[in-house]
Image (cartoon, rainbow, N blue to C red):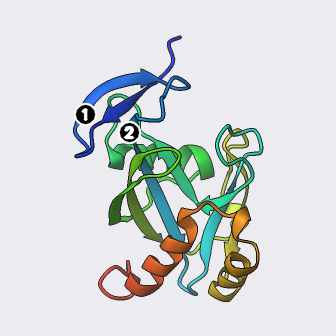
Amino acid sequence: MSKAKIIIVDEKDSVIGLKERGTLKPEDIYRVSALWIQNSKGDTLLAQRSFNKKHDPGKWGPAVAGTIDQGETYESNIIKEAEEEIGLNNCHFEKAFYKMNDGKHKHFVQWYFALLDKDIHEFTIQKEEVEQIKWFSREELLKKLADFPDIFLKSTKECVDYFSNNVGSGMHIT
């Protein structure tokens, strides 16, 4: 069985090639999709990355995220990852924001948003990818981000700010 190949893009997000996982160089730019989930109380579902992950093990971040493989789009990837990582299928979500993260690992990320009222025990996590998931109240999340920023992925604070300002203003899913 051959390894899945990751889509490599240029600075305008145009496909320029494919690479096997684990062979990326610092100058390579790839694609990621991510899903930010909130419930009707305004709580946010976050996932703690598996401690076995190569990048950012054990850090808290979006409920679902994945690198886009050959043959996938941002949308098809997030549908697949939502089902694989937390057992979520037939979920309605909306496109949120899109940006390039230009840090240690350069990538474009398309964020999606879902409003979902589910008990934590209704999810099925993929242990290879996710250590645990947890609903955080807005207050708890802001306090933890302020007191313990290193336990979160760098994008988490930006997402809290973005979704706090945009959910309810045309993005609220009914």
Pointers 2 and 1 in contact (C-beta within 8 Å): no
Circle 1: element type: strand
What amino acid type is highlighted by mark number 1? Val
Question: Which residue is tagged 1?
Answer: 15
Question: Which residue is tagged 2?
Answer: 29
Compared across the picture, whether 39 is left or right of 129 comes to left
Compared across the picture, whether 6 is left or right of 132 comes to left
Residue in front for this viewpoint, 102 or 60: 102
Above or below: residue 76 compared with residue 156: above
Q: What residue sits 69% from the left and 70% below the top?
A: 149
Compared across the picture, whether 11 is left or right of 37 comes to left
- Structural crowding at the residue carrying mark 1, measured as other residues with C-alpha within 10 Å and reported as few (<14), some (14–19) or many (≥20): some
Residue in front for this viewpoint, 155 or 72: 155
What amino acid type is highlighted by mark number 2? Ile
Choose top left, top right, bottom left or bottom right for residue 27. top left
Residue in front for this viewpoint, 123 or 108: 108
Q: Nearer the viewer, mark 2 or mark 1?
A: 2
